[in-house]
Image (cartoon, rainbow, N blue to C red):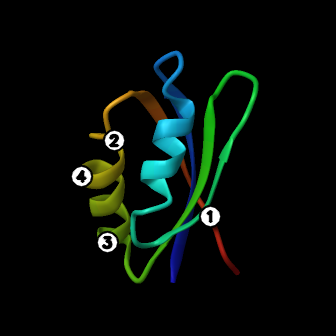
Amino acid sequence: MHSAFILMNAELGKENQIVKKLRQIPNVKEVYPVYGVYDVLMELEADSMEALRETITVKIRKLDGIKSTLTMIIVKD
């Protein structure tokens, strides 16, 4: 299993709408609106790196209101 944390910048006022949409995407484990440099924090899990990449590039980054993302792949021992 492969996992990643994704930090997102959202357009002003669209944070809650983005959080609701993200929670509907398969493989999304947790989603939180946050304060600070980023607006949304999400944990994503998938069976393969390719599935992880596909979810990030096709389903997440293309959501209306997302301005930018920062993906951190979780390293497991």
Of the two numbered discs 3 and 1 in the rendering, the one whose residue sits closer to the viewer: 3
Residue 6, percent across and down? Answer: 55, 48
Q: Which residue is mark 4?
A: 58
Question: Going from the N terminus, do you reach mark 3 or mark 4 first?
Answer: 3
Which label sits on residue 22?
Answer: none
Direction from residue 4 to residue 24 in the image, left or right? left
Q: Amino acid at mark 3?
A: Ala
Element marked by disc 2:
loop
**Which residue is under mark 3?**
51
User: Dot 2: few (<14), some (14–19), or many (≥20) neighbours within 10 Å?
Assistant: some
Of the image marks 1 and 2, the number of the one nearer the N terminus: 2
Numbered mark located on residue 74 in the image: 1
Of the image marks 2 and 3, the number of the one nearer the N terminus: 3
Residue 9 in picture, x, y percent from top left: 52, 27
Please name the amino acid that badge 1 sits on.
Answer: Ile
Q: Which amino acid does the dot numbered 2 rest on?
A: Arg
- Say which label, 3 or 1, has the lower sequence index: 3
Residue located 59% across and 52% down the image: 42
Q: Secondary structure at mark 4?
A: helix
Callout 2 touching callout 3 (CB < 8 Å): no
Circle 3 crowding by C-alpha within 10 Å: few under 14, some 14–19, many from 20? some
**Residue in the picture at 48% in, 38% down:** 17
Query: Are there few (<14), some (14-19), or many (20+) residues within 10 Å of tag 1?
Result: few
Residues at marks 4 and 2, CA–CA distance in whole angstroms? 6 Å
Q: Which residue is mark 2?
A: 61
- Going by the numbered disc 4, the residue's amino acid type is Val
Residue 24: percent from the left, percent from the top? 42, 63
On the image, which quarter does residue 49 sit in?
Answer: bottom left
Q: CA distance from mark 3 to mark 1?
A: 15 Å
